[in-house]
Amino acid sequence: MTEEVADLDARGLLCPLPVLKARKRLQGLPPGALLRVTADDPAAVVDVPHFCAESGHALVSQTAGENGAQVYLIRKKG
């Protein structure tokens, strides 16, 4: 059984919008849910891991995506 993953496309958004949108999207998900965030803001490389550490969510992975974007997989705390 594969886990369902919610998607957030934050490409084209600049700091702090990718993190703010991720926070809002995570609020609507159940504890333990996965959120895949795609962002091309260079600051997201620092901001997303920092957001996860500060809020208690787990940064499962951080990988290179298409056209210079980064793809973050976040597991909601709980």
Image (cartoon, helix red, strand yellow):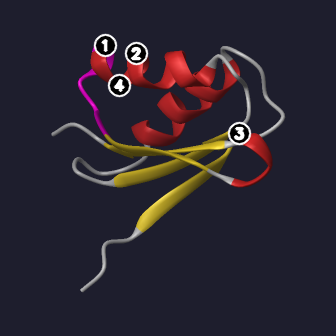
Contact between marks 2 and 4 (CB within 8 A): the answer is: yes
Contact between marks 1 and 4 (CB within 8 A): the answer is: yes
The residue where tag 1 is placed is 54
- Label 2 secondary element: helix
Alpha carbon of mark 3 to alpha carbon of mark 2: how far?
17 Å
The numbered dot on residue 50 is 2
Alpha carbon of mark 1 to alpha carbon of mark 4: how far?
6 Å
Name the residue: 73% across, 54% down: 66
Q: Nearer the viewer, mark 2 or mark 1?
A: 2
Q: What residue type is disc 2 on?
A: His
Residue 1 percent location from the top left of the image: 24, 86
Residue 67 percent location from the top left of the image: 80, 49
Q: Residue furthest left?
A: 78
* Mark earlier in primary sequence (3, 2): 3
Q: Which residues are magenta?
A: 54-59
- Label 4 secondary element: helix
* Mark earlier in primary sequence (4, 3): 3
* Mark earlier in primary sequence (1, 3): 3
Residue 25 is left or right of residue 66, and the answer is left
- Label 1 secondary element: helix
Alpha carbon of mark 2 to alpha carbon of mark 4: how far?
5 Å
Q: What residue type is disc 4 on?
A: Cys
Q: Dot 2, crowdedness within 10 Å: few (<14), some or many (≥20)?
A: some
The numbered dot on residue 52 is 4
Residue 47 percent location from the top left of the image: 52, 17
Name the residue: 36% across, 54% down: 34
Q: Residue furthest right?
A: 12
Name the residue: 38% across, 71% down: 4
The residue where tag 3 is placed is 10
Q: Quadrant of residue 78?
A: top left
Q: What residue type is disc 1 on?
A: Glu
